[in-house]
Image (cartoon, rainbow, N blue to C red):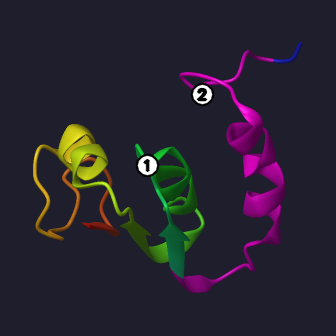
Amino acid sequence: MRQPAADPYWNTNVARHPGILRAVPEGCGDALEVGCGDGLLARKLAGRAKHVTGIDKSSDMIVRLEGRCVGVPSPVRPGVLWVC
């Protein structure tokens, strides 16, 4: 039986995540998400790439998801760097 998705919400961007993740080559070293918002895709990419950088123009989004906006490694997921 199919398990419910673990995503906290759904929108048209979230609907594209499976296709994006399938396109990440095996052994991917670095991934960049531009306009990362709350970082949902960047956190998913961290499961497929060694290092992920999430960039967003809105410092409020970065502050909201990490509590800071200084580009330090994420305590939530090793290998993720947030930048605004």
Quadrant of the snapshot with the C terminus: bottom left
Residue occupying image coordinates x 14% and y 59%: 69
Estimate the x, y position of residue 50 in percent, counting from the top left: 47, 77
Residue situated in front as seen by the camera: 49 or 41? 41
Label 1's element? loop
Which is nearer the N-term, disc 2 or disc 1? 2
Estimate the x, y position of residue 34 in percent, counting from the top left: 51, 69
- Relative to 56, is 76 on the left or the right? left
Label 2's element? loop
Residue occupying image coordinates x 31% and y 54%: 58
25 is within the stretch colored magenta: yes
In this picture, is 27 found above or below 84?
below
| Residue numbers of the magenta segment | 3-30
Estimate the x, y position of residue 5 in percent, counting from the top left: 69, 23
Residue occupying image coordinates x 81% and y 70%: 23
In this picture, is 51 found above or below 57?
below
| Residue type at numbered disc 2 | Asp
Estimate the x, y position of residue 68 in percent, counting from the top left: 10, 52
Q: CA distance from mark 2 to mark 1?
A: 15 Å
Quarter of the view holding residue 7: top right
Q: Which mark is residue 37?
A: 1
Give the residue pinned by disc 2: 7
Residue occupying image coordinates x 23% and y 45%: 60
Q: Are marks 2 and 1 in contact (CB under 8 Å)?
A: no
Pointer 2: residues within 10 angstroms few (<14), some, or many (20+)? Answer: few
Quarter of the view holding residue 10: top right
- Relative to 39, is 58 on the left or the right? left
Quadrant of the snapshot with the N terminus: top right
